[in-house]
Image (spheres, coloured by chain):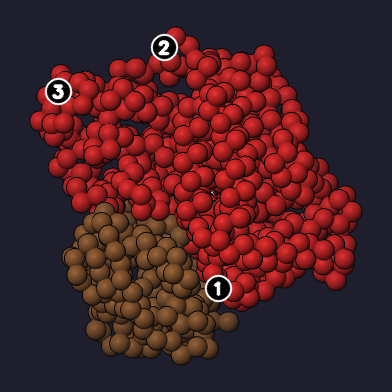
Chain colours: A brown, B red
Amino acid sequence: MNLTLHVWRQKNAQDKGRMETYQAHDITPDMSFLEMLDVVNEELVAKGIEPIHFDHDCREGICGACSLVINGIPHGGKRGCTTCELRMRNFKDGDEIYVEPFRARAFPVVKDLMVNRSAFDRILQAGGFVSVNTGAVPDGNAVPIPKTDADRAMDAAACIGCGACVAACKNASAMLFVAAKVTHLAWLPQGKVERERRVKKMVAQMDKEGFGNCTNYYECEAVCPKNIRVEVIARMNREYLRALPKKIE
Amino acid sequence: MKLVNPANKRKYHVIVVGTGLAGASAAASLAELGYNVKAFCFQDSARRAHSIGAQGGINAAKNYQNDGDSIWRLFYDTIKGGDFRSREGNVYRLAQVANNIIDQCVAQGVPFAREYGGMLDNRSFGGAQVSRTFYARGQTGQQLLLGAYSALIRQIGRGQVKMFPRTEMQDLVLINGHAKGIVVRDLVTGKIESHAADAVVLATGGYGRVFNLSTMGLGCNVTAVYRAYKRGALFANPCFTQIHPTCIPYSGEFQSKLTLMSESLRNDGRIWVPKKKGDQRPPNRIPEDERDYYLERKYPSFGNLAPRDISSRSAKEVCDEGRGVGPTGYGVYLDFADAIKRLGKHIIEQRYGNLFEMYHLITDEDPYEVPMRIYPASHYTMGGLWVDYNLMSNIPGLHVIGEANFSDHGANRLGASALMQGLADGYFILPYTISDYFARAGAQNISTDRAEFRAAENEVEDRIKKIMAVNGRQTAESFHKRLGTIMWEYSGMARNETGLKKALELIPALREEFWKDVKVLGEAEDMNQTLERAGRVADFLEFAEIFAYDALNREESCGAHFREEYQTEDGEARRDDKRFAYVAAWEYKGVGIKPELHKEPLDFENVELATRSYK
Ligand SMILES: Cc1cc2nc3c(=O)[nH]c(=O)nc-3n(C[C@H](O)[C@H](O)[C@H](O)COP(=O)(O)OP(=O)(O)OC[C@H]3O[C@@H](n4cnc5c(N)ncnc54)[C@H](O)[C@@H]3O)c2cc1C
Ligand code: FES
């Protein structure tokens, strides 16, 4: 099939950026969206145009590197699917496709479709861990953990940190991302020791990075490629309320 | 082993390149001890290292299942799995620390799968008759890496680690023969910069993308270890590369990567092809007695859980006979119908749900209804930089951990053992052994103003200018594809002398063409993905040659290295312990010049060299 692409091009963070139109030829249904862009890039290079830059690595939906807003929806709108997993069989001959970067104040554009998501790293740095050094730890089976708790922790821990939730939200809120980490650790006995400190510090950092508030639009859940549920936000709010009156250093 | 006093540790600076399981765990553990650490990765975040993609699980000899597992058994299985081409001492140590890894990860909050009683669950993996693999659904690598990353960011927050994402190592800097720094390119600004330290740790992963198509992340490369090799580090057993049996088959020219379907699927899936050549009937229409469950037939005691090298080769064999399935004829079935009948769809969904979904997304076929189609693909590299028992290379101060070194897996790695090795190296071995080097060399407070750094920076800049200046017609990507075809054809699952000699003609010719005709657009002083790719491909084009020399030199079949000339009558590998019970460590002599072979004999004091049989 042949497609028309409207792609965001921006030389660097300072550049204003603009949409450019390119044709994609001989695209087959088995190609992934990124492989389609590879094909377009090969053609651009042949014409002496610098190829479209985008983040990617694993190309199987787990590293969280790929991003892209496709026709207005982060990762293209197929449920439980990242851009790199999205196949071209979801499009048809003659389609026009708009491709833009994840947009949010806290995610400045690096180049073209690449954005800087280091704010996420800094939020986790503030408290998204258990303070345990290598060594002195008990046997893995010393503390039994109910299977359902472990499963719920895992459901939340599946987050790949791609940032689609932020890009989908009108307020550019990072609540789903932050809540997923808080919830993952809150379900486990190992995470409970520092729960107050963790939630307070992470929320404070989230605000500092310039992410917006959650006003319950739930767009985040709809685009999350790992199907993280908005329940985690409720859980985080409870954790936060619980922690509020407590002093942390 | 010498130690460094706790108060003196803060005088030492360490560079860790790579933040996968090995690098992140090492950087965090070194920082906890008080060393000053700088960590580097080329992705935009440390959390996205290739380790994130590991699916199936991680081994340890906890014997929680009471099925007779022990440290000795894990040690023996690993040595045997590697077809007796690894060092006893290293492997024994690995088996010893494996249990600590599980404890450490649980303490960090890694949500391993649990049984209803609240205890950790295990599954089985190929090449073992005990159930010792710990897992977190089909995302074990992700969860382990997020655990190691959480330890790392905690140290970043404390200021004990300085993190440099989107930064690529371009060269190693030696001072008086010791590794004392690196030259890097800032991938956002294109700036070339130097960093100095008292020791350098490479944790840069494997080179499986020398085949172009592989299950590895697209950025995986040989650059860091190859540049260290050019500075004098020995490259050990480069031809030992693993071809994984269960990947989604190739479907067209455009393809950028092959997707792994975890080996854990072989716990419940049965592998088969039609008995008849060219049988085009849909799988569900082929009656039971016209199917060949070839692994169960050939290896009754291990069946579908035969080790990877054997399973891959068997798949190639049946496809070469014309019995392969799917549009290209290069595929075999992995069938869950029996398991679904026995256990119910619900259980299969619990065990492999996310893998089934991934398969469905990619192929548009529902594996609950029709059998999966799979075929082998390049997946892991056992070879790597040569290291001693302390994980230090022959260049003093240069340490190499994780998939980047050659140490523990011999000629074939067993499933769920790479995660184990990466974390063993990073959490429990290197932080301890590196002190031996520090105690001997002392803290030197080296500055990047030294001439050695200038010289290395100039070399890096010249090379980039040279690539940019070619201004030819073909993309780096197209060269990578052609190199991959050569390697797969002549150095892949089965190799022979004629083919390897042919590869040794084709590779230099392709390299020459690259330097005459590669096309890189954009600027060097800017974010430039085509330049990054071209630099990596240029290194693969040199490295491929040592790979082929090594495969040619090793006139035996062992593990994943199958030389067609050396096989038994029924097509099994014929190892030659008299001539080849050694590690082949290659020394750089110049581009296009045959490297010099050094042999490290392998002595087995505790295990007997046996023919590896899984029948
Ligand atoms: C799809 C898949 C599934 C797997 N499943 C399993 C499994 O179930 N069990 C198991 O035991 N093993 C598995 N493996 C193997 C295992 O994942 C890897 O061997 C292991 O994760 C490697 O870890 P590492 O830390 O050595 O390197 P990596 O995780 O590859 O990390 C390399 C790091 O080095 C950095 N880097 C590389 N080059 C440079 C450079 N030039 N400059 C700066 N930084 C650089 C990268 O940014 C990255 O941070 C799997 C592998 C694949 C591909
Ligand atoms: S490239 Fe890794 S999730 Fe898409």
Left or right: B158 in relation to B598? left
x and y percentages locating residue B274 in the rendered image: 21, 25
Q: What residue type is labelled 3?
A: Glu
Q: Are marks 2 and 3 in contact (CB under 8 Å)?
A: no
Q: Which chain carries label 3?
A: B
Q: Nearer the viewer, residue A8 or A41?
A: A41
Left or right: B456 in relation to B141? right
Quadrant for the N terminus of chain A in the image: bottom left
x and y percentages locating residue B339 in the rendered image: 21, 34
**What residue is drawn where x is 65% and y is 25%?**
B553
Q: Do the residues labelled 1 and 2 touch (CB within 8 Å)?
A: no
Left or right: A214 in relation to B502? left
Q: Where on the picture, by quarter, is residue B603?
A: top right
Whole-angstrom CA distance, mark 1 to mark 2, is 55 Å
**Which numbered disc flags the more N-terminal residue, 1 or 2?**
1
| Number of numbered markers | 3
Q: Nearer the viewer, residue A163 or A4?
A: A4
Mark 1 element type: loop
**What residue is drawn where x is 62% and y is 66%?**
B468
Reading the image, the residue beneath label 2 is B570
Q: Which amino acid does label 2 sit on?
A: Asp
x and y percentages locating residue B38 in the rendered image: 69, 66
Quadrant for the C terminus of chain A in the image: bottom right
Mark 2 element type: loop
Residue at the extreme top of the image, as rendered: B569
Q: What residue type is labelled 1?
A: Gly
Reading the image, the residue beneath label 1 is B522
* Ligand 1 contact, mark 1 (Cβ < 8 Å): no
Badge 1: residue crowd in 10 Å (few <14, some 14–19, many ≥20): some
Badge 2: residue crowd in 10 Å (few <14, some 14–19, many ≥20): few
Mark 3 element type: helix
**What residue is drawn where x is 20% and y is 51%?**
B364
